[in-house]
Image (cartoon, grey):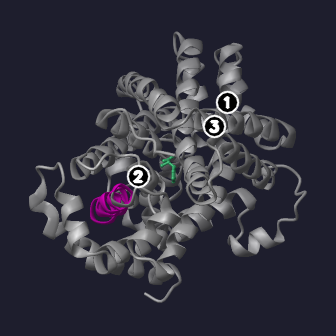
Amino acid sequence: MERAHWHSRMGFVLAAAGSAVGLGNIWKFPYITGVNGGGAFVLVYLVCIALVGLPVMAAEILLGRASQKSPVGAFRVLGGGPWVLVGWLGVVCGFVILSYYSVVAGWALHYTWLAVTGQIAGLGPQGVEPLFNQLYQSGSLNLFWHAVFMIMTIAVVMGGVGKGIERWSRILMPTLFGLMVILLANSFTMDGFAEGLDFIFGFHTENLTRDGVLEALGHAFFTLSLGMGAMLTYGSYLHENDDIVSASVIISVLDTVLALTASLALFPIIFTFGLEPGTGPGLVFVSVPIALSQMTGGTFFAVVFFFLLVFAALTSAVSLLEVVTSYLIDEKLWSRSRAALVAGGVILVVGIPSALSGGTDLFGSSFAETVGRGRNWFDTFDYLATNWMLPFGGLGIALFTAWRLDDAIRHRAFLEGTNLAVFYKGWLLLLKFVVPVGIALVFLHAIGIL
Ligand code: PHE
């Protein structure tokens, strides 16, 4: 069967941006910035994006385009040997990340429901605050919305590359940007704006911990969908002459701008209403409803915001499922429908402990708490996958591209279609030395050696 391709380069950029921009930007970045005390954490994160994320992004898309294969096959045809393990790690990450990602996306679905039925604006600030804990502790609600979200994700992936993923991204991404601008404009007018700004950009090094540095690196990978072959898989649906370099820059910049915009929209709200910035995963689900419940047109904005949160999550979840699905299609020769259904079904099941994390511990949390340093299942999956597996995968991708990949293939693939060819040498230097050394240093720092 002939390999599917994007209908246009624009379609690819939007789909890849759709993968990058997701819960990572709107839900996770603000909450981990809050937990890690703001400023210094944001700076480390930005450095990681520029020096590590961007070069790895170009490398991943390049490996995909050059091999026209999903991760496992890509490493096999381009270099073979033990490198195939990097591709395997990606498939495993797809399972792990999507299993809890879908639970959080389920929260967004629940809030969409609350907003549509008028329960957010109607309740007032005191009324909406406890909503999150009620949801978090309810196993049945979590399971229900997790299942609904997985079914949506499976449906898009079954639609295929052009008709499913690309078409949805074309509609959802521009809308998402428009809405962010409205929320940002709203936060400019709030009393807590200056305090919010200082929290995000003021340089508060005293708050930055060892785990904070690791988390900034991990999040750079997570937010750009790197280290597990999602960008590689999307790159494999590109044609030979599509420009990889400028696409990588556009995707990374869009993603970063969106994360900063989301924080700029949120922290002023948090400070205006005297909320705690470091409360963790519930941050967006508490602060935004509080603000919306007092704005004119609150119900309208609440509906739009949570719909968009769902859609941002959906275009990312689709790319996670696509990694597993394309593996089954390419390597096991399954049909797309069967691959998406089976992979999605298994992920739904793997997500059950995460869905039940907030409630009574059906699955016994002592293992999770040991491995995850006092975290429950949900946090443990996130901690291990984001902070360790993704950077480790990124290390493999950088080393492979810089040291193992045939020079002629690499050079030609980088130059094809781009007018940014002058960056080739710099890119290679980053991949050869800066990325591996940087990741190694952060790992050593995290385990306490540095
Ligand atoms: N980048 C997505 C986000 O920020 C998450 C993601 C990670 C998607 C890894 C695909 C692969 O929400």
**Quadrant of the frame with the C terminus:** bottom left
Disc 3 crowd rating (10 Å Cα; few below 14, some 14-19, many 20+) is many
Q: Hey, which residue is sitting farthest bottom in the picture? A: 449
Beta carbon of the mark 3 residue lies under 8 A of ligand 1: no
Q: Which residue is mark 3?
A: 153
Q: Are marks 1 and 3 in contact (CB under 8 Å)?
A: no
The main secondary structure of the magenta stretch is helix
Residue depicted at 32% across the width and 41% down the height = 254
Q: Is residue 282 above or below residue 347?
A: above
Q: Nearer the viewer, residue 125 or 311?
A: 311
Q: Given the image, on which type of amino acid does mark 3 rest? A: Thr
User: In the image, is residue 48 part of the stretch drawn in magenta?
Assistant: yes
Q: Given the image, on which type of amino acid does mark 2 rest? A: Ser
Q: Which residue is mark 2?
A: 236
| Structural distance between the alpha carbons of marks 2 and 3 | 20 Å
Q: Which one is closest to the eye, mark 2 or mark 3?
A: 2
Q: Given the image, on which type of amino acid does mark 1 rest? A: Leu
Q: State which region is magenta.
A: 43-65
Residue 434: x percent and y percent?
A: 27, 76
Residue 417: x percent and y percent?
A: 17, 48
In terms of sequence position, does the residue under pointer 2 or pointer 1 come before the other? 1
Name the element at disc 2: loop
Q: Which residue is mark 1?
A: 109
In terms of sequence position, does the residue under pointer 1 or pointer 3 come before the other? 1
Q: Name the side, left or right, on which 447 lies relative to 252.
A: right
Q: Name the side, left or right, on which 86 lies relative to 50.
A: right
